[in-house]
Image (tube, helix red, strand yellow):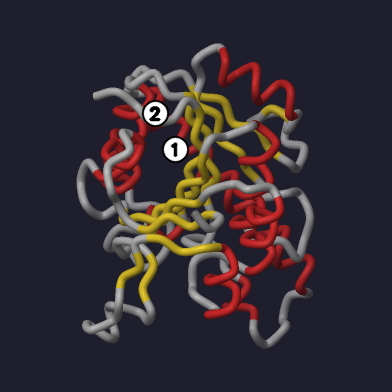
């Protein structure tokens, strides 16, 4: 199946790696998602990923401020490195060459994030996993995904979620919620739709980076999305 895109950045939430577990990594889920990424890789698409860390630590759990916010964010960044290493291993078992680049120095397990090195890895046919967010507290992995997509010159930022696109309300709570096929960045910001955080949306808007929001639960959706089929919701400029 031919691809519509040359280079994509895929954002996966840490929760996607939970499967039926309440905490940590469900290896069946890791293998399943890795298999879909491998299918896209074999379409001769350059693939980069940002994986969240919510399956291990979420700032929301620290609502009583037991841990200082900045420290909590660093813990979350380390959690993303754990997920990145697990996903790297799963991909390499599928014979997909993979590199983990971390925004926090961890030389024993990951390369340091250097933009030109990341691009070179992609050009050499390696999947690149960006870990540790932006390396700074107070920024989400959504913002990290937007930033990295811009830095590597991705054609599109693809956000995999548990629902098939962007809805007017949570479809798991409100079955009659309206699904949007296409939205502008301003629509998302003004309607406060749960796509990505406002910083990430604003960054994409300022740099004209299209976003595709789709469900990773439906087998083959990632391949269909990369092939240009109508999957999920597109967020872009008007027209």
Q: Nearer the viewer, residue 135 or 226?
A: 226
Percent across and percent down for residue 170 are: 35, 79
Please, is residue 75 above or below residue 110 in the view?
A: below
Residue 45's image quarter?
Answer: top left
The quadrant of the picture occupied by the N terminus is top left
Percent across and percent down for residue 65 are: 72, 83
Residue at numbered disc 2? 91
Residue at numbered disc 1? 87
Q: Residue at x 49, y 54 (%)?
A: 239
Disc 2 is placed on an element classified as helix
Percent across and percent down for residue 52 are: 54, 54
Percent across and percent down for residue 50 are: 55, 45
Q: Residue at x 29, y 23 (%)?
A: 2
Q: CA distance from mark 2 to mark 1?
A: 6 Å
Residue at the farthest front position: 239
Disc 1 is placed on an element classified as helix
Judge left or right: residue 226 versus residue 104. Answer: left
């Amino acid at each position: 199946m031919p691809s519509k895109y040359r280079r994509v950045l895929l954002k996966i939430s840490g929760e996607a790696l939970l499967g039926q577990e309440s905490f940590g990594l469900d290896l069946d889920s890791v293998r399943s998602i890795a298999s879909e990424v491998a299918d896209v890789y074999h379409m001769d698409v350059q693939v980069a990923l940002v994986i969240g860390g919510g399956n291990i630590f979420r700032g929301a759990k620290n609502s009583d401020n037991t841990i200082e916010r900045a420290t909590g964010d660093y813990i979350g960044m380390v959690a993303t490195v754990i997920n990145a290493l697990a996903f790297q291993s799963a991909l390499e078992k599928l014979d997909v060459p993979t590199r983990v680049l971390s925004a926090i120095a961890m030389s024993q397990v990951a390369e340091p994030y250097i933009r030109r090195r990341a691009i070179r890895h992609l050009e050499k046919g390696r999947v690149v996993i960006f870990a540790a967010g932006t390396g700074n507290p107070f920024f989400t992995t959504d913002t990290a995904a937007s930033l990295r997509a811009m830095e590597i010159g991705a054609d599109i930022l693809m956000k995999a979620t548990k629902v098939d696109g962007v809805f007017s309300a949570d479809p798991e709570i409100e079955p009659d919620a309206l699904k949007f096929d296409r939205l502008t960045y301003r629509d998302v910001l003004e309607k406060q739709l749960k796509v990505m955080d406002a910083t990430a949306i604003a960054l994409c808007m300022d740099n004209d980076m299209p976003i595709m929001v789709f469900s990773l639960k439906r087998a083959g959706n990632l391949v269909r999305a990369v092939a240009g089929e109508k999957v999920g919701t597109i967020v872009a400029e008007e027209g």
